[in-house]
């Protein structure tokens, strides 16, 4: 028996009268319209974070580019290119958030939330490309050392880069965690590394002021190493999402919530997956074998209700109710076994 609860108001046949009264009087965010509003609001928050950070990082990169032109610092050039790339990652993420608002259809039956994971992959590739460019420029300057001009301006530009990146990093990470967007969190971590790279430029400027010509390209290589480190973390997070990985703590929380539902004997298979920054659930609950269809359906609805409260980012759940087996009864799922092997 399968119950897909993506519809409007629920019936709670196994609830107490007090619970039913509270449900009627209290607005719940899991009604269909509210779930849509929550999805749109989370996308709107993501878009706002993207465009604000694009403006801040764009201004930071322009200021740094002006200093690069008069100083010739390859460390600052690497930092500027990386900041520019970080600002431009707002474009694929913005497209993904806009696509994610589109309703599911007969071709994309789960909607367009996966576009966000593809955008995360684009961000990872952008980080990799900026690391390669920074390494190439730094190695070139190691082979052909040149003095850095206007060292005080380079130092100021480095501090501006750190301040801009750290502000953007906090904003993106905070918003990404609030709406459940792995791509936006990865982008925030990217910005945070850029901030530390800017501080490294400050060290290069100090070395240049002391007459150490190799300080600037060496710092450029250090920036490359930092970029590679954030690349590793961001790639791991994005690829996990693309492979439907979830935090095991979410699964534990979901199981505890469903087991507490009256009428649920036990929880069978439970699966969670992220589609963009929203969760979907599929699970089996075992109920009394003598329960009527309506009673089993009411229990399944209560299970979804419990999940929606336990997992705030859940957008939909598919609940299958299995009857508890009677002694000597043949498992009805055996007829499916030969279709599910190989």
Image: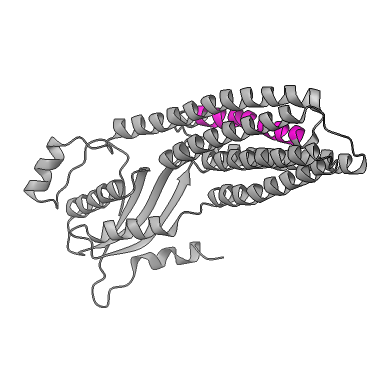
Left/right of residue 233 with respect to residue 201 in the rendered view:
left
Q: Is residue 91 magenta?
A: yes
Q: Is residue 292 magenta?
A: no
Residue 299 to residue 178: above or below: below
Q: Is residue 249 left or right of residue 157?
A: left
Q: Closest to the observer: 91 or 305?
A: 91
Rendered location of residue 85, percent (x, y): 68, 32
Magenta span: predominant SS is: helix
User: Which residue is at the far right?
Assistant: 144
> Residue 148 occupies which quadrant of the picture?
top right
Residue 24 lies in what quarter of the image? top left
Given residues 19 and 338, the one toward you in this image is 19
Location of residue 86 (image quadrant)? top right
Q: Which residues are magenta?
A: 76-98
**Picture layout, residue 178 above or below residue 311:** above
Which residue is drawn at the image coordinates 23% and 61% (left, top)? 264
User: Which image quarter is the N terminus in?
Assistant: bottom left
Residue 296 is situated, as x and y percent measured from the top left of the image, at: 21, 55
Residue furthest to the bottom in view is 328
Q: Is residue 108 visible?
A: no
């Amino acid at each position: 028996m399968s119950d897909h609860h993506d519809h409007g108001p629920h019936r709670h046949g196994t609830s107490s009268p007090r619970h039913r009264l509270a449900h009627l009087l209290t607005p719940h965010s899991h009604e269909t319209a509210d779930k849509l509003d929550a999805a749109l609001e989370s996308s709107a928050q993501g878009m706002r974070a993207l465009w604000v950070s694009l403006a801040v990082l764009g201004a930071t990169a322009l200021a740094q580019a002006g200093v690069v032109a008069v100083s010739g610092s390859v460390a600052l050039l690497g930092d500027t290119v990386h900041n520019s790339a970080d600002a431009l990652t707002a474009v694929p993420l913005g497209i993904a958030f806009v696509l994610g608002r589109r309703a599911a259809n007969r071709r994309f039956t789960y909607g367009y939330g996966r576009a966000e994971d593809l955008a995360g992959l684009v961000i990872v590739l952008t980080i990799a490309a900026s690391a390669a460019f920074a390494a190439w420029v730094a190695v070139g300057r190691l082979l052909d050392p040149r003095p850095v001009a206007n060292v005080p301006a380079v130092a100021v530009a480095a501090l501006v880069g750190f301040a801009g990146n750290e502000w953007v990093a906090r904003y993106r990470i905070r918003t990404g965690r609030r709406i459940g967007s792995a791509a936006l969190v990865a982008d925030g971590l990217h910005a945070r590394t850029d901030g530390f790279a800017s501080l490294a430029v400050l060290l290069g400027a100090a070395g240049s002021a002391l007459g150490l010509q190799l300080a600037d390209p060496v710092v450029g290589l250090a920036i490359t190493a930092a970029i590679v480190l954030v690349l590793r973390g961001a790639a791991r997070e994005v690829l996990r999402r693309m492979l439907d990985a979830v935090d095991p703590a979410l699964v534990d929380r979901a199981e505890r919530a469903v087991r507490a539902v009256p009428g649920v004997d036990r929880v069978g298979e439970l699966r969670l997956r992220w589609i963009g920054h929203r969760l979907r659930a599929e699970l089996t609950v075992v109920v009394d074998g003598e329960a009527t269809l309506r009673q089993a359906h009411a229990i399944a609805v209560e299970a979804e209700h419990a999940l929606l409260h336990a997992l705030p980012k859940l957008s939909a759940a598919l609940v299958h109710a299995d009857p508890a087996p009677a002694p000597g009864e043949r498992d009805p799922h055996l007829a499916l076994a030969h279709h599910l092997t190989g």
